[in-house]
Image: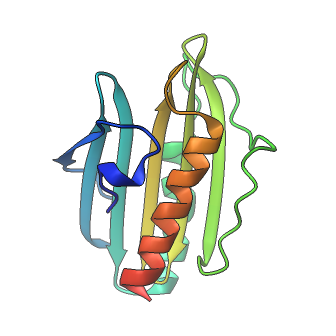
Amino acid sequence: MLDGASFPLHGVETRDSDPPGPSGSCHRAGREYFTHLHLGLQDIYEYNSAEKASRSIAWHESIVFGENSSTESWATPPELAFQSVEADYLQQKCAVWRGDIWVCAVVAQYGEYVFRLSLDLYPGSLTLSGFEQVVQAMDERAVRYLK
């Protein structure tokens, strides 16, 4: 899991959370990130096999990238060019949420693990470049600890 040092912002604090789980996941863990604002969530799901994890991707994407009344269409901005060479799957997208606030998220699979990360990009806070730095930190940790 990421810690506050993984963010290009100072003073990021963390709090463990209990994410919802799809059927078939064995273990799951979550963490919330915040400064004076709520920044977002990271959830990690462990499955019995890489095949089961792969079959769960559509469910995870429906949760993370689902449309709601306050989010415009999800798309991958050109600024998000990071491509993991180690992940079995990695999709990152952003949407405008509540006017001038963006939400960016990633769903990634590393073997039998599925990672979800969703961060709010408030004006004057985290940028698209900062979000990409956090995704790269997540990828580096996943590779270091899981493969």
Eyeballing the image, is 142 above or below 28? below
Where does the image place residue 133, in percent across and percent down from the top left? 56, 53
Please identify the residue farthest to the front as the structure is shown: 10
Residue at position x 59%, y 76% from top? 87
Residue at position x 42%, y 82% from top? 144
Q: Quadrant of residue 83?
A: bottom right
Please identify the residue farthest to the top as the structure is shown: 99
The quadrant of the image that shows the N terminus is bottom left
For residue 137, side relative to residue 44 (left or right): right
Can residue 92 be seen here?
A: yes
Residue at position x 19%, y 50% from top? 18
Nearest the camera: 49 or 30? 30
Where does the image place residue 118, in percent across and percent down from the top left? 46, 43
For residue 13, side relative to residue 123 (left or right): left
Q: How is the image coloured?
A: rainbow
Can residue 22 be seen here?
A: no
The quadrant of the image that shows the C terminus is bottom left
Where does the image place residue 31, in percent across and percent down from the top left? 26, 50
For residue 100, side relative to residue 20 (left or right): right
